[in-house]
Amino acid sequence: MAEEVLAEMVANVWKVVVAQGDEVAEGDTLVILESMKMEIPVITESGGTVTDLRVAEGDVVQEGDVIAVVG
């Protein structure tokens, strides 16, 4: 089953660590968000392939936005 990785807060996408098609393991960092001068890693809770990456560096995400889908 695919896992949608969601933004937990309003933030800027500071760095994208993975690309669509990459294999990831549970606990891997997908992107790093920046909010109020703090860097917040966004991790996956399941391993698999990044089937959809919906953000790019410089994007602004809102709480609940889908960052990536891991299947």
Image: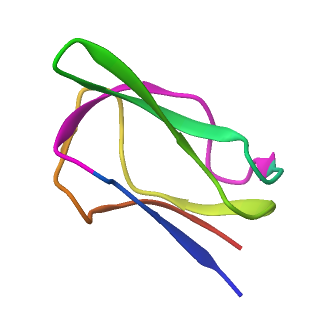
In the image, residue 38 lies at what x, y percent?
30, 17
- In reply to whether residue 10 is colored magenta, the answer given is yes
* x 76%, y 47%: residue: 22
Compared with 34, 69 (above or below) is below
In the image, residue 35 lies at what x, y percent?
21, 26
* x 20%, y 57%: residue: 63
In the image, residue 26 lies at what x, y percent?
79, 54
Compared with 38, 62 (above or below) is below
Please tell me which residue lies in front, 19 or 69.
Answer: 69
* x 71%, y 74%: residue: 71
- In reply to whether residue 46 is colored magenta, the answer given is no
Of the 4 image quadrants, the one containing the N terminus is: bottom right
Q: Residue furthest bottom?
A: 1
The image quadrant of residue 65 is: bottom left
Magenta span covers which residues? Answer: 9-23
* x 72%, y 41%: residue: 28
